[in-house]
Image (cartoon, rainbow, N blue to C red):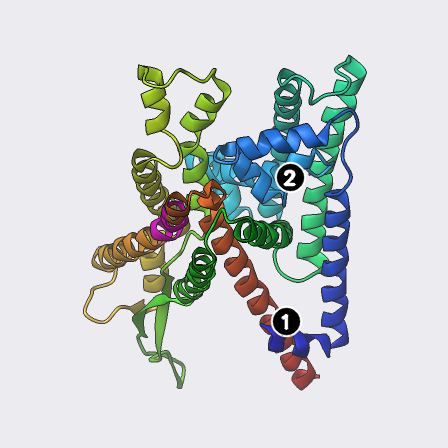
Amino acid sequence: MVQTIRKAWGIPELRKKIVFTLLMMLIFRIGNAIPVPYVDTNLLETYIQQMSTTVLGLYNVMSGGAFAQATIFALGVQPYINSSIIIQLLTVAIPALERLAREGGEEGKKKIQSITRYTTVAIAVLQGWAYYMLMKNNYGILTNDSIWAALVIIVSFIAGSCFVMWMGEQITEFGIGNGISMILFAGILSRVPTMVSGMIQSTVSGDIAWWMDVLLVVGILVLFVLVVFVSEAERRIPVQYAKRQVGRKMYGGQASTLPMKVNMSGVLPVIFAQSIAMIPSTIGAFMKAPEEGTFWYSVLQAIDTKSVLYMIFYFVMIILFSYFYSTIQFNPVEISNNLKKNGGFIPGFRPGKPTADFIKKVLGKITLFGAIYLGIVAILPLLIGKIIDNPALSIGGTSVIIVVGVALETVRALESQMLMRQYKGFLE
């Protein structure tokens, strides 16, 4: 990655793109340090730390710690991510949106993007209001609970979320890689110094033995290697194109492959499964704590994010969502029809339904392997956190997948830009 960035830095056009991306990241970090008025950030941060194993903890990680500080970028990219997921699901469920996405071409993509933006604003309004009510219902967090203060706080959150969305689109157009992914990447990396200092303080104070820190670092490095290996892994199905004669020339006859990513759906199943699996514990965290030994105390312990029941449910949800997203992104029937139209076929299988059935069978096996891999990466930090009694690790697997995925995506984007420049120079 470092070598690729060094080569790209030597090209003036790519240097401008890298500088623009870094400038946007700087603006994002500055916005994450500006709190909205009328909020006691110390009390809020203490409260969010107590809720670190709930959905609020997930939002705090995704925002780079801005959620616990109630900054103008506290909502981060969450409204846009939720909006994208909702529109993607509706595109499958609503025929009109499906036709717009498939047959609309560039104009259809622009309309889908416009719908996503409006949905992002609507979700930001709901989340901004819910965030304000959360602070208002916890006595002492708000220094002023008047209508004017509520309007200022909610509008600040909405404007910050819309501005983050705009920055992400600008990075995608004028910078390097996917803008929303880059902002998410920057937010997660910004928490690394805090995590390291916390580990050092725990070791110095004697709360955690030094060998546990060493084991944790080694485990994270192994996790990085595993994520990189699986992210780059793919199943290549051989495809042969039939020869055809046009006039006096012979076309086709070449062999190719149909690549299928092992982890086709990325980190989306983990984020979606985690949000749903944390709902019971989040509801329980807002309820009055029951006395130890009662029925409701046993229920809350069973649905806690450190419980075995939660881990099993979380793992099953990841597998289900992995299959769901793979079926959305990869249609065996459509692939089979495209191969048939272009004169291609998979050796040993007749074009049409037999080819589609074979691709569907391979897709099922690959999706199962990718889902189990995502489940292991997501559950492993939970198990380690349970062993060393550190609930903050409950979202560590998601962060690793996002960081590695965005880093690999950025490297591929830089390499493709350099390759295009070489062809352009050759043609000119």
What is the span of residues highlighted in magenta in the rendered image?
374-383
Mark 2: amino acid: Ser
Q: Position of residue 389 (x, y in %)?
A: 42, 42
Asked which secondary structure carries label 1, the reply is: helix
Whether pointer 2 and pointer 1 mark residues with C-beta atoms closer than 8 Å, the reply is no
To which quarter of the image does residue 238 belong? bottom left
Q: Is residue 179 above or below residue 278?
A: below
Q: Of discs 2 and 1, which sits in the foreground? A: 1
- Whether residue 93 is visible to the viewer of this picture, yes or no, is yes
Q: Main structural element of the magenta stretch: helix, strand or loop?
A: helix
Using the numbered discs, state the Cα–Cα distance from disc 2 to disc 1 in whole angstroms. 27 Å
Mark sitting earlier along the chain (2/1)? 2
**Number of the label disc, if any, that sits on residue 114:** 2
Q: Position of residue 364 (x, y in %)?
A: 26, 53
Observer-nearest of 239 and 399: 399
Q: Quadrant of the N terminus?
A: bottom right
Question: What residue is rendered at 24% in x and 60% in y?
Answer: 355
Q: Is residue 9 above or below residue 176?
A: below
Question: What residue is rendered at 75% in x and 43% in y?
Answer: 33
To which quarter of the image does residue 152 belong? top right
Asked which secondary structure carries label 2, the reply is: helix
**Number of the label disc, if any, that sits on residue 210:** none
Crowd tier of the residue under label 1, counting other residues whose Cα lies within 10 Å: few below 14, some 14–19, many 20 or above: some
Q: Which residue is mark 1?
A: 417
Task: Please state if 384 lies on the left or on the right of 416 as rendered.
Answer: left
Please tell me whether residue 269 belongs to the stretch shown in magenta.
Answer: no
Please tell me whether residue 381 belongs to the stretch shown in magenta.
Answer: yes
Task: Please give the count of numbered marks on the rendered protein.
Answer: 2
Crowd tier of the residue under label 2, counting other residues whose Cα lies within 10 Å: few below 14, some 14–19, many 20 or above: few
Question: What residue is rendered at 35% in x and 49% in y?
Answer: 375
Mark 1: amino acid: Gln
